[in-house]
Amino acid sequence: MFEKVLVANRGEIALRVIRACKELGIRTLAVYSEADVDSLHVQLADESICIGAAPSTESYLKIDRIMSAAEIGDVDAIHPGYGFLAENPHFAEVCESCNIKFIGPSSQAMQAMGDKNAARAAARRAGVPVTPGSEGIVETESDAIKIARKIGYPVMIKATAGGGGRGMRMAHNEPSLQSAFHSARHEAEKAFGNDQVYLEKLIVNPHHVEFQIVADSHGRMVHLGERDCSIQRRNQKVIEECPSPLMTSSLRKKMGHAAIKLAKSVGYENAGTIEFLVDSNKHFYFIEMNTRIQVEHTITEEVYGCDLVKEQIRIAAGEPLSEHVARATPRLHAIECRINAEDPAKDFQPTPGRIDFYYAPGGRGVRIDSHVYTGYTVPPYYDSLIAKIITVGATRINAIERMRRALDEYYITGIKTTVPFHAAIMRNGEFRAGNYDTGFIERVMSSGKLDLTSRPIRLRE
Amino acid sequence: MEPKDIKEIKTIIDLMKKNDLSVLEIEKEGFRIKVQRGSSGQTAAVAPLQTAVPPKAALASTDAASGLPKATESVPLREIVSPMVGTFYRAGSPDGSPFVDIGKTITEETVVCIIEAMKVMNEIKAETSGVIAEVVAENGKPVQFGQVLFKVR
């Protein structure tokens, strides 16, 4: 087992990794930017090294400084978290060449699935259904038009170097396709340094259902069921649940089997997630694979009774898949709400700043993964996620009522948060009935019917 | 002077001690006072290596560490901070002589030290001019981004 691990990330996931390491008796080294001096992950790590100025490009994305810190700290392994360098094959390669274990898949597997278009090709080869679309990169506008005529509108133009909901454009007809094609390429060049795009048929109002897979270095791979992540705002997930309200055991078998087949075909190791879209006829289509631990790994942990981050570390250390993970079956129902430092009443405008008072709910079946505390200042340089609240219940409605109860207790002052937004969703009829798809948030927000007036308790601070 | 004024002055002195200031001047409504601390028996602590944020250039700073007798107003010292993560070396080779020492005059182009990162020896330039007043970082010890290496007058 490793003696020391460097956590190459920040915020709640850095804290998550540090907690897993502490439980395994592994020493931790946190690297941080000047804006994260007071961050909880820095305070709780055994050692910490400042690696740069606030902007990510000056710190969390600086491979040379991270490797330098790893050398000074004499670490055995690096956990990349999610985002930043977690899906950077070059970073994984650098770790490999420095004999520091990268806690995740190999750089080759990462490369194979990181290029979205190549991943689609791998899925086709593995006999996994993909959304109808272009066979590869679409080079010219006229090619785009030809393909769109064939697969039918509406279509999605997607950057092959994109991912995580970024680098995507929609087109409902030929004129809009012409402009969207060029602006998508331009945007992709700016955001990812790669302007290559491919086309996919836009499946209207699908469910976004993803499968968690875990594989050790001894050839054993299992899937730990699905997560429904359809509740999204601008292609960013806001609420996730496990199991999916639309899942049946036969569909789970089919999709799980497809997920494993695809991951095995690229020699995948460690934790990963295969994302699918499911249409109203329960047909599923592969869209992309995330070669890292995900934000919402938590709900799978609660339902399947495992610690995925500890499992990642064990696998990286060469241990075989834990029996309780290999044989895990779903019990209970879990929901996660992502709490962001954003004002839902002002179009989710980011609200960085000092948290004057922070009280998180507790009680049976409530889990909070958060790096914030009273007096903590949310910096403006990074994503706005300040906490994940997860509730578990015997049934779906139990988990929802528990989330409603817990959100009403969640007391954060000094900044605006999306707690009232989630509290309103928990009371929404469509959500409670499980009748939602990726268009749900758009519809409910534009209907103006969502009651965003906070109903928090007033704590005497 | 009124008792109230003396109380105010005592508060000022405490504040100066707490924040390690040498000189403080206050002017308000026709009232002006200047308080100056002596360095007798005062040794300022060198910034500990695990300090996360490099102290920003303060309005007044401790100069007691350089051992100068306090007769005039102190000149704020500038800092040369580490631009990377690595190991700090004062000389170009194990038995070489240090690039700079206290009292050495430097220009922006002067190489003041080496920071070794991933087996690469990086020559660090002063990027300021003046005279080395203090060597803060320890030879052969790791330094982090933003850590104070030298103080310059």
Image: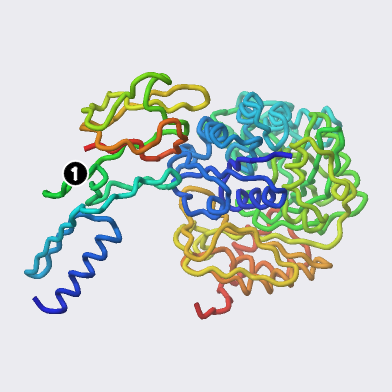
Could you say where residue A93 lies in the image, as x and y percent from the top left? 64, 26
Using a 10 Å C-alpha cutoff, classify the residue at mark 1 as few (fewer than 14 neighbours), some (14 to 19) or many (20 or more): few
* Residue A86 appears in the rendering: yes
Foreground of the two, B62 or B110: B62
Residue annotated with mark 1: B68
Quarter that holds the N terminus of chain A = top right
Q: In this view, does A194 lie above or below A408?
A: above
Q: Which residue lies furthest to the left in this view?
A: B30
> Relative to B103, is B22 above or below?
below
Instruction: Say which quarter of the image contains residue B23.
Output: bottom left
Image point (70%, 48%), residue name = A25
Q: Quadrant of residue A165?
A: top right
Residue A230, percent across and down? 72, 53
Q: Which residue lies furthest to the front in this view?
A: B41
In the displayed image of the protein, which residue is found farthest to the right?
A: A250
Indicate left or right for A438 with A33 as reference.
right
Query: Residue A154 is drawn in which quadrant?
Result: top right
- In depth, the one of A43 and A394 nearer the eye is A43
B54 lies left or right of A116:
left
Query: What's the amino acid at mark 1?
Result: Leu
- What residue lies at 40% left-to-right and 40% top-to-bottom? B146
Q: Left or right? Give the position of A218 relative to A351.
A: right
What's the chain of the residue with tag 1?
B
Q: Give the residue displayed 62% in from the left and 24% down from the top.
A: A139
Residue A24 percent location from the top left of the image: 72, 48
Residue A191 seen: no
Q: Find numbered disc 1 in the image and state the secondary structure of the residue it sits on.
A: loop
Asked if A266 appears above or below A312 in the picture, the reply is above
Nearest the camera: A327 or B100?
A: B100
Up the image or down, A237 lies above or below A57; here it is: below
Q: Position of residue A439 (x, y in %)?
A: 68, 55
